[in-house]
């Protein structure tokens, strides 16, 4: 059996984010042989080309963390029908310096939760457009649109609905199959 280290990025800085709870839930249902590690984005400065001459250590660490994993799951909230600014900022750093995009050929999956019935579908579509520009192979199916009903995810990531837990485990299994297609 293969071993996988999958990084996850939470596109929200809120300590009470339901998307952070979703990320914790993924760690609870990860199949055997799959380890999930967070790739934090809170310490990244706002991107400016002016900072590239003295590349920030936080950005170097961020890029190294992406390089060190087999694939990345991006757990995104939806802000104004798109991705949060903090997540876009992280993606901008991942693409710098020019020609050294961290997500190029890096298997990526996109998932998110909100209280609405379409979940984070518009944000995920914008995110997939960005990842396509980076030449990142992105999981197409299953899609991860999770409607977060009250009590679905506990603060520690426990999932109250067995069907949702099974879906999330299957989602990660599908992602490992994508990773297998791109392993050296």
Image (cartoon, helix red, strand yellow):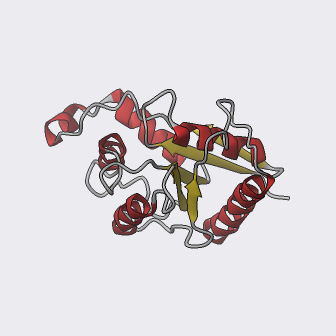
For residue 184, say whether it is visible: no
**Residue at position x 51%, y 67% from top?**
138
Query: Which residue corresponds to the image point at 55% horizontal and 52% vertical from the top-left?
Result: 72
Where does the image place residue 123, in percent across and percent down from the top left?
Answer: 39, 58
Report the front residue among 144 and 99: 144
Residue 158 can be seen, yes or no = yes
Q: Is residue 155 above or below residue 7?
A: above
Q: Position of residue 14 (x, y in %)?
A: 44, 30
Q: Quadrant of the C terminus?
A: bottom right
Where is residue 91? Give x, y as percent. Answer: 35, 49
User: Against 184, is 161 above or below?
Assistant: above
98 lies left or right of 113: left
In which quadrant will I find the N terminus?
bottom right
User: Residue placed farthest to the left in the image?
Assistant: 50
Using residue 115 as the reference point, say whether residue 81 is left or right of it. Answer: left
Q: In which image quadrant can residue 151 be found?
A: top right
- Relative to 107, residue 149 above or below: above
Q: Nearer the viewer, residue 61 or 146?
A: 146
Vertical comparison of 172 with 42: above or below: below
Query: In screen coordinates, is 40 left or right of 50?
Result: right
Q: Residue at x 70, y 68 (%)?
A: 177
Name the residue: 54% across, 39% down: 18
Instruction: In this rendered view, identify the residue nearer to me: 126 or 184.
Output: 126
The mark tally for this picture is 0
On screen, residue 139 versus residue 157, left or right, reads left
């Amino acid at each position: 059996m293969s071993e996988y280290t999958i990084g996850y990025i939470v596109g929200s800085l809120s300590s009470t984010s339901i998307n952070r709870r979703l990320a914790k839930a993924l760690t609870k249902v990860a199949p055997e042989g799959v380890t999930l590690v967070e790739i934090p984005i809170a310490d990244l400065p706002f991107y400016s080309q002016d900072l590239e001459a003295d590349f920030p250590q936080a950005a170097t660490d961020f890029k190294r963390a992406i390089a060190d994993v087999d694939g990345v799951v991006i757990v995104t909230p939806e802000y104004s029908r798109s991705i949060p600014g903090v997540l876009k900022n992280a993606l901008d750093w991942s693409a710098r310096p020019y020609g050294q995009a961290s997500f190029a050929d890096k298997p990526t999956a996109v998932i998110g939760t909100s209280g609405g019935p379409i979940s984070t579908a518009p944000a995920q579509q914008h995110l997939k457009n960005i990842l396509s520009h980076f030449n990142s192979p992105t999981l197409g199916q299953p899609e991860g649109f999770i409607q977060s009903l009250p009590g679905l995810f506990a603060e520690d990531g426990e999932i109250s609905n067995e069907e949702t837990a099974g879906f999330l485990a299957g989602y990660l299994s599908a992602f490992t199959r994508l990773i297998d297609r791109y392993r050296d």
